[in-house]
Image (cartoon, rainbow, N blue to C red):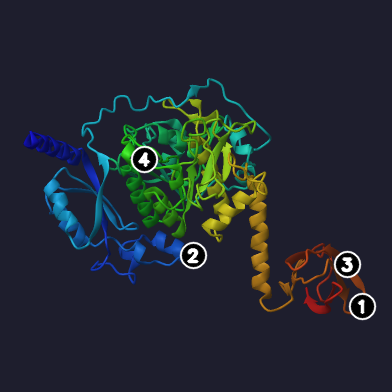
Amino acid sequence: MKNTILFFLLILTLQAKSQYSRYIIELTNKQGTTFSLSNPSAFLSEESIVRKRRYNISIDSIDLPVNSSYLDSIKKSGNVEILNVSKWLNQVLIKTTDQNALNKISKFSFVKKRYPIARRSNEIIDKSSLGHLTNSETSLQETFEYGKSPINYGSTGPQIMLHEGEYMHERGLQGQGVKIAVFDAGFFKYQNLTAFDSLRQKQRIKGTWDFVERNSSVNEDDIHGMWCLSILAGNLPGTYVGSAPQSNYYLFRTEDAFSEYPVEEQNWAAAAEKADSLGVDIITSSLGYSEFDDASFNYTYVDMNGLKTTVSKAAAIAIKKGMIVTNSAGNEGNKKWKYIIAPADVKDVLTVGAINISKAVAPFSSYGPASDGRVKPDVTSVGLNTFLINSNGAVAQGNGTSFSNPNIAGLVACLWQAYPEFTNLEIINAVRQSADHFSKPDDRTGYGIPNFRIAYTALDKERQLRKVKEILKADDIKVFPNPISDRINVAFKNDNSTKIDFALFSMDGKLIRSYHFDLNQNEFHLFNLEQLESIPSGQYILTYNNGLKKGSIRILK
């Protein structure tokens, strides 16, 4: 009887060991790598290197690829297939059911630990049903025009204009030159739909990769990513225009729509590294992780602190490498889980909740805060009855924070296009601070509805301030250019004054023009003294007086 019980336990143990087929192998170091930080072009694109230099981001050991000899040893340990590698996390995703190989791998001196990340899956996937998911999608037969914008948005007018996104679009800022990587479960029929004609004709799809099946085709997979892409890049003037219709795009499938396992977090990390290596500016991800098909992998709300999960660690590194990451908050608000899901919990991820066009919170939009008390979500956009393109190319509507997120991501791209000298965090902070209740955030909408006219204006002011500081350096006042043409530009460092007066005199003491400005205390200012077109060429004297500082400067026209 005792032997029978032991045999039965052995059978259960073997079954338990064999129910998983994909594992993470964490490595201890990168010693012996053939790559060097002194030659980053061997593992990063020139675009990636330029972006890092522009924003003073160091290329460090995190960027170095995993030691190839370690990978060779793992591959040769038995019936093992390497699926992908994360250099940022220094770990390897493998596929195997070879227990002897796993035991051998665990004994390697360079292996920190191993653990399962997904159960066995059916290797033959029937894709006949793909592209027919609804996600509250409803067809619309008619189109609409909203507002007075010279851009005829059609149906998307309300979701763009809610944020005054047209303020940027009208200035020609539609995402040109900005590289956006979209992470999702597939982009069904994106190659065939008229809404993406301009993407194809202008060759703005810069790359695709399927991290689930490890090939370059993402056109036949799940429809969810295509919906999100349409909100960003759809372009049917007069019928449907996305929030960043002129950006360049990378389409990465990281999610398997048929199951939910942490292996998808590893795929997300691998995709983020690829995006970084390609010089991508923005990652937008309408994905999130909290509970899985195998409950042993489940997280708890306490884990939503931006530090615990694989996907959150990867998102945090992506941000440190200079990219903007936007992510949907999650659709758990009316479910048992309730709260945001990873990587929406990361500090500097721009997490987007859902409202309708009337600014009412969508019941499904996940609650904040992050488990450590930080404000989440950050902002909100239209995620209830969002306009998108469906699988037959018609305008439709759908529900989910999956759809509020890309609307914001596209507008962020246009903002960064306007102010490329600002860092990712400076852009994100401008968006947060533009929101309609920034001073009173809450756990449903965060800082509220961002206004991109306000964000644009704030960054323009900051740009001028930086220009003034650079012009002045150690001086209190400086006039430029000199000689002048039709105006005088004056950079001025103010202390405690609340006003300043300027006066322009001819060389014989005749007053030509006078100007008065109110001042903010302890700030830098840039003044434009205009209406000088009609004065003749010659020499003049400009005087200034703010009650504390006064003087004169010789001007030549």
Q: Mark 3 points at which residue?
A: 514
Quadrant in the picture for the C terminus: bottom right
Disc 1 element: loop
Which callout, 3 or 2, points at the residue further toward the start of the chain? 2
Kind of residue at badge 4: Asn
Q: Which residue is depicted at the point 29% across and 41% down?
A: 212
Q: Residue 509 carries which label?
A: 1
Q: Residues within 10 Å of mark 3 (few under 14, many from 20)?
A: some
Question: What amino acid type should be assigned to the residue bearing mark 2?
Answer: Arg
Q: Viewer-nearest of labels 1 and 3?
A: 3
Name the N-terminal-most of marks 1 and 3: 1
From mark 2 to mark 4, how far is it between C-alphas?
Answer: 40 Å
Q: Earlier in the sequence, mark 3 or mark 4?
A: 4
Quadrant in the picture for residue 16:
top left
The percent coordinates of residue 151 (x first, y second) are 61, 37
Of tags 4 and 1, which is closer to the observer?
A: 4
Residue underneath mark 4: 298
Residue 243 visible from this viewpoint:
no
Q: How far apart are marks 1 and 3 (CA)?
A: 13 Å
